Amino acid sequence: MSASPRLPDFVIIGAAKAATTWIQMRLQENPSIFMPDPEPHFFSREYDKGEDYYRSWFEDAPGWAALVGEKSADYLSDPATPARLAAMMPQAKLVAQLRNPVDRAYSDYKMLYRRGLVSDRPEDYLSSPDNPEPRFLLDGLYGRHLSTWLRHFDREQLLVFPFEDVKADPAGVIERVSAHIDAPIAPDTDRKTVSRRENNSREKLLPLPLRQMLAPFKETVRPLRGKPWFEGARALLAREVKYPALDPALRRRMEEFYRDDIALTEEITGLDLAHWKVPAASVAA
């Protein structure tokens, strides 16, 4: 009887729209690390499928992999995930990446907008959590979410860093994450690859009606991607998505919404997030 696949040594828990795909892809470039490409979302959405189902995500891990991990960006904000994950993997190392919550919420809105899942103005979703997509605002309450995680894990198990660090020093971020999860640094790390962006909202896409029409053939055409003739044909039709703008007045209301939670996040993490806070003049106004 074959041994059951191993459980992860580390988990990237979010936040969504804070470069979690970027760090996942950089870690996957390290031959000593195995991570599945898709997000399992086990502890948040698929928990009723059981531990054997979760272990099956890691059955392709090669024998030489020193570490196994996964990334599910909704774990950070899901209230049930910390207790579930701690019960199954109490020694797991956790990695959280935090983005300015206003920018994160607007980026999340843009993602669903380009997918055609929301069509109204940002004001209809970002003025208050009382809307069909409360996650846009609530997922950015990092202090609240981290408090829940730290009721189940020791602080030393959790590495937290801001999105700005990824932009300023991507190689340094990889070194910090690798040290936290006890992974050796890959000797042939490519600096250009390290700096590459993933899931860029400015990427040119086919018009939404055409994307929806072609969706059933997504897997069929996947082998054609990268071929010059295919990419040339796609380039003739692809356009950068024009998103509804985030009004400055709405941004100020969002900054006020997050003000106290940002202070709590600083207290928990020791990070200086002054550049996320509402200017004093804006609060007074």
Image: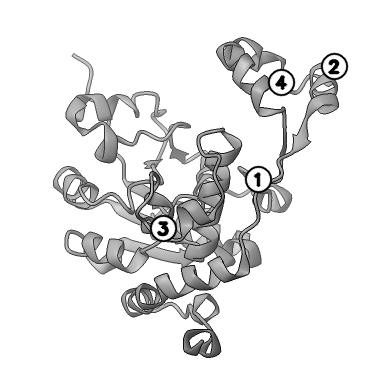
Give the residue displayed 28% in from the left and 49% down from the top: 78
| Element class at badge 4 | loop
Residue beneath label 4, please? 225
- Give amino acid for label 4: Arg
Vertical arrangement, residue 149 with respect to residue 3, above or below? below
Pointer 3 local density, CA inside 10 Å: few below 14, some 14–19, many at least 20: many
Q: Write the residue at 47% across / 64% down.
A: 101
Q: CA distance from mark 2 to mark 3?
A: 42 Å
In x, y percent, where is residue 196? 68, 48
- Give the x, y percent position of residue 285: 51, 87
Q: Secondary structure at mark 3?
A: helix
Labels 2 and 3: the sequence-earlier one: 3
Question: What's the mark number on residue 137?
Answer: 3
Say which label, 3 or 4, has the lower sequence index. Answer: 3
| Mark sitting earlier along the chain (1/4) | 1
Amino acid type indicated by mark 1: Asn
Q: Are marks 3 and 4 in contact (CB under 8 Å)?
A: no
